[in-house]
């Protein structure tokens, strides 16, 4: 014969339900004659810390920007619309030039260096393409500096949010 020590809640099973008796510690002796009883074990789990929503990385880039391009003896102002999806950045920017129609661009790239840099390619809707590199201002995340490279020329390219000012310097790296 073996002796076991169990802690359990005894429960009388009735057709209408179950009623419980407070938890008790019992010494049971196992014999060759089985004893039938009903028991309900109560298990508790350790509470887990509540999870708080974490801001999606890269959101500092998302939204509307004012942009400025300078290089090859030209300069343009414009606007950009940026979307972020995980580690990817995409969108459009439109530059204003009274002498040229259709300075509308699309861009796609990846977010690097802890979402502080955006690297990728751009394409002018009416032809032309190149690469870009942009970096958020670490002290003013509502500004970024960067460049557009066409293969022939590298242009300063920077952006800022409404209510802010154009970053200086505008070109990076």
Image (spheres, rainbow, N blue to C red):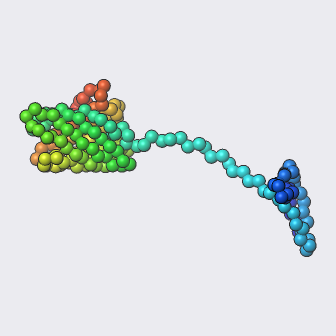
Nearer-the-camera pick, 156 or 47: 47
Q: Is residue 63 in view?
A: yes
- The residue shown at (78%, 56%) is 41
Residue at x 22%, y 46% (from the top left corner):
106
Q: Residue at left 24%, top 42%?
A: 92
Image position, residue 9 (x, y; %): 83, 54
Give residue 102's position: percent from left, percent from top.
Answer: 14, 40
Please, is residue 126 above or below residue 73 in the view?
below
Looking at the image, residue 48 sits to the left or right of residue 68; the answer is right
Residue 145 visible in the snapshot: no
Q: Quadrant of residue 138?
A: top left
Quarter of the picture holding the N terminus: bottom right
19 left or right, relative to 79 = right
Q: Is residue 166 above or below residue 72?
A: above
Q: Position of residue 23 (x, y in %)?
A: 84, 51
Q: What percent of the width, then of the height, locates residue 117?
A: 31, 43
In the displayed structure, 35 sits above or below 23; it is below
Residue at the image position 42 percent from the left and 43 percent from the top: 56
């Amino acid at each position: 014969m073996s002796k076991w020590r169990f802690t359990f809640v005894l429960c009388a099973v009735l057709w209408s339900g179950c009623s419980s008796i407070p938890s008790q510690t019992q010494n049971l002796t196992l014999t060759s004659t089985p004893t039938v009883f009903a028991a309900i074990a109560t298990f508790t789990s350790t509470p887990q810390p509540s999870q708080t929503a974490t801001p999606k990385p890269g959101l500092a880039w998302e939204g509307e920007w004012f942009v400025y391009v300078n290089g090859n003896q030209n300069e343009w102002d414009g606007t950009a619309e940026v979307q972020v999806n995980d580690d990817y950045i995409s969108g459009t920017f439109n530059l204003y030039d009274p002498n040229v129609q259709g300075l509308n661009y699309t861009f796609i790239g990846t977010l690097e260096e802890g979402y502080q840099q955006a690297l990728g390619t751009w394409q002018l809707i009416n032809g032309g393409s190149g690469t870009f590199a942009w970096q958020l201002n670490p002290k003013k995340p509502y500004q970024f500096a960067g460049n557009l490279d066409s293969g022939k020329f590298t242009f300063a390219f920077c952006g800022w949010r409404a209510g802010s000012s154009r970053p200086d310097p505008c070109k990076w790296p």
